[in-house]
Amino acid sequence: MEPKMIWANLASSDLERTTQFYIDLGFEPNGNRTEELSSFLFSKNKFIIHFFLKARFESSARSEAANLEKQNEIIFSLSAQSVAEVDEWYVKVKKAGGTIYAEPEKFEKGYTFGFADPDGHKFNFLYWPGM
C-alpha cells in the first residue's frame, strides 16, 4: 500500500491574519476555506498546508498545539532557484510581516534564510545548486 497524498495540518490563532500572510507571499489558496480552515498550495507539486483554527486543531489532535514561542514542531524548507531568489523571498517575507529567525547565509554549498509566520510556524527558503 502507498498513500496517494501527504499534506500538513497546522494550528492558527487568527485565521484571517494567517490567510492574509500567505496571500501576501503569493501562495495559491487551495479553495478549501471555511470558518475553521484556510488552505494553501506550496510548490509545483501542489503540497497542501491546511491552517485550522487552534481550537479545531486541538480538538482533532486530541491534544494541545505546540507552544511555538518555546518549542518547534517542524521546519518546512522551500526551494529557490538562485541566491537572488532567496534574497527576494527574504524581502517579501519581511514586508508581509514574517519574523526572521535566521538571516540570509551561506549553508555548505547552498544559501538560505529562516522565517516564522504570524503563528510561529517555521520555514526556510533554500537555494541548493543542482536541486
Image (spheres, rainbow, N blue to C red):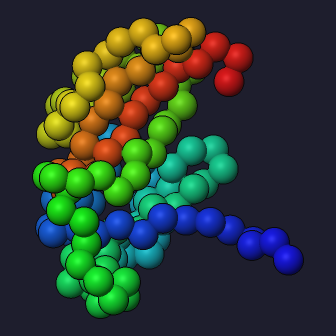
Question: Which is nearer the eye, 49 or 19?
Answer: 49
Q: Where is residue 30 in the image (x, y as percent from the top left)?
A: 48, 65
Image position of 131 (left or right of 69)? right
Q: Can residue 65 be seen at all in this image of the molecule?
A: yes
Residue plotted at (60% across, 54% down): 46
Q: Position of residue 58 (x, y in %)?
A: 27, 83
- Relative height, residue 18 to residue 126 (above, below): below
Question: Which is nearer the eye, 64 or 56?
Answer: 64
- Relative height, residue 81 to residue 22 (above, below): above
Question: Which is nearer the eye, 106 or 39?
Answer: 106
Taking the view exactly as shown, the residue that stands out farthest to the front is: 70
Q: Which quadrant of the figure contains the N terminus?
A: bottom right
- Relative height, residue 54 to residue 117 (above, below): below
Residue plotted at (44% across, 75% down): 32
- Relative height, residue 80 to residue 1 (above, below): above
Residue plotted at (45% across, 45% down): 76
Image position of 63 (left or right of 39)? left
Q: Can residue 23 be seen at all in this image of the molecule?
A: no
Residue plotted at (35% across, 57% down): 73
Report the number of numbered marks: 0
Taking the view exactly as shown, the residue that stands out farthest to the right is: 1
Q: Position of residue 80 (x, y in %)?
A: 52, 25
Q: Position of residue 85 (x, y in %)?
A: 45, 18
Q: Which quadrant of the figure contains the C terminus?
A: top right
